[in-house]
Structures are given as structure tokens and as C-alpha cells.
Amino acid sequence: MKSIFPPPRIRRLIDLKGQEAQFLAGRSSRFREALQVLRVALEFIRGFRALHFIGPAITVFGSARFKEGHPYYKMVHLVGRRLAQEGYTVMTGGGPGLMEAANRGAHECKGYSVGCNIRLPMEQAPNPYLNKVVHFHYFFVRKVMLVKYSYAFVIAPGGFGTLDEMMEALTLIQTGKIYDFPVILIGKDYWQGLIEWLKAKPEHEGALKLDEVSSLLITDDPEEVISKIKEVTMGFGLKPFDHRPKLAENCL
């Protein structure tokens, strides 16, 4: 009996819009897979070229679903302002919500604001507060860029995507793949339950040790965020941009 290749389930996935959906849709022809690898490589190269000169960046992860006026939006907006005041580039996923809040805070203080936007079937438009935006088809390429050029990670409240990005950063630190950069969770009420669960279950059962990530911090205070980032980054000689003469009057 003649085999059907690819099977119907895989064919349906291949028909999905988007290069990443096709890439992850299981086995396909060798020629198609070679083309997919080439697309991935080209996307990496494009990301490297676009982000090489952005300066010392701090990545802010957070939900696209918390809009202006929400207390979390206000908190992240202030963090973005303070990072810009200290000369750091503020980098996010480039979308709306809390990503917009961080970019907006930096933009209003004439800091450098960068977005790594992901192309989705339901299009995620980049927010309007970006000095530079890079568009990606592949989530995993985008995530590499958000980690590669960052010296600290600020984790604002979010959902599956934010949790994935946070755990990726923590895993890379725990396994020694990147330096023990600060991982700062803002929003104590939002994150405290997760920290308590990590202590009560995974740490208690021996699956992890939270002290393996010594720069993990949970806070509601934007000044504590800045203090922790400066403490760690200045420790290895990082020099943020000195753009204070260009700061807007309301950011001095």
C-alpha cells in the first residue's frame, strides 16, 4: 500500500500561515527542511546586524494585555523611564501592553527604545515608542536576541509567553550559559505565589536551588530595580550611555 507523505495532520499544519508553524509541523522533504534552516539562519543574521550597536540593553518582559491606566502599566512605565535616565537601552518584545509601557517610559526620557516584534497569524503591531524595531518570524530566534544583548531581565506580570521567557533566562543562568545577570520580578502580589511554590515544591524536593540564581529579586519598587541592575552591571565594568544632556525636562 502506498504511503501518504506527509500525513494529513502534518499537511494541515504546513498549510498554516507563518514560517515557524511550517518549521515545527513535523517531518517534511529534505529540500523543504534545508530551505527552512536557511530562513532561520538568515533571521539570526538579520537580528545580529540590527541589534549589534544598540548599547547596553535591559530586557523587559511582560503581558500585552495590561493596558494604559492599569497599575502594572504605570509601574513598568516608571521602570522604563528610570532605565533610560541611567543610560540603559530598554528592549522589549515590541508589542502593546506592558511592553509598550517600558518602551514609552524610555522614549519619553529620550532614551533608546528597541522592540523585537513577532509576526503572528493575528498580527501583533509594534508599539509607537520604538527607536528601532526588528521583526521576527520565529519565536526562538526572537528569544535568543532578547537574551543575547541584555545585561538584566525585568519580568513584569504576564502569561505563558512571559513565564517562558523568565524560565529561559533562569535556566541559562543556572546552567552557566550566561552570566548571573539580575532577574527582577516586579509585582509582588502577582509573583509571590510562584516564588512560594518554587520553594515549597521544586526546591523542597531537590529539583532546584533558588540560590543558584543569586541575582533573583522580587519587588514593587522601581528604585530597587535600578539599584540591583547597577550593582551587578557596574561590577563587571559596564558603562551605560551618558545621554543625560538630552533628557527631557520632565525626566531630570
Image (tube, rainbow, N blue to C red):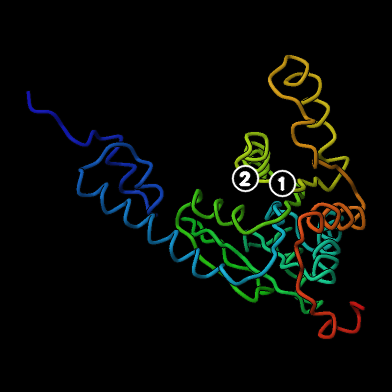
Residue at point 90%, 84% (across, down): 249
Disc 2 secondary structure class: helix
Write down the quadrant of residue 40 in the picture: bottom left
- Judge from the rendering whether residue 18 lies leftward or rightward of residue 136; answer left or right: left
- Judge from the rendering whether residue 122 lies leftward or rightward of residue 61; answer left or right: left
**Amino acid type at mark 2:** Gly
Q: Nearer the viewer, residue 23 or 41?
A: 41
Q: Quadrant of the C terminus?
A: bottom right
Q: Nearer the viewer, residue 209 or 247?
A: 209
Disc 1 secondary structure class: loop
Number of marks in picture: 2
**Amino acid type at mark 1:** Gly
Picture coordinates of residue 207 (x, y %)?
68, 20
Picture coordinates of residue 54 (x, y %)?
63, 70
Q: Residue furthest top?
A: 205
Write down the quadrant of residue 171 in the picture: top right
Picture coordinates of residue 145 (x, y %)?
56, 57
Residue at point 76%, 55% (across, down): 236
Q: Residue furthest left?
A: 1
Residue 141 vs 202, above or below: the answer is below
Look at mark 1 in the image and give the residue it sits on: 158
Badge 2 density bin: few <14, some 14–19, many ≥20, Cα 10 Å: some
Q: Determine whether label 2 and label 1 are within 8 Å by CB.
A: yes
Residue at point 38%, 61% (across, down): 42
Badge 1 density bin: few <14, some 14–19, many ≥20, Cα 10 Å: some
Picture coordinates of residue 181 (x, y %)?
73, 48
Q: Quadrant of the N terminus?
A: top left
Q: Nearer the viewer, residue 152 or 12?
A: 152
Look at mark 2 in the image and give the residue it sits on: 161
Q: Nearer the viewer, residue 188 or 47?
A: 47
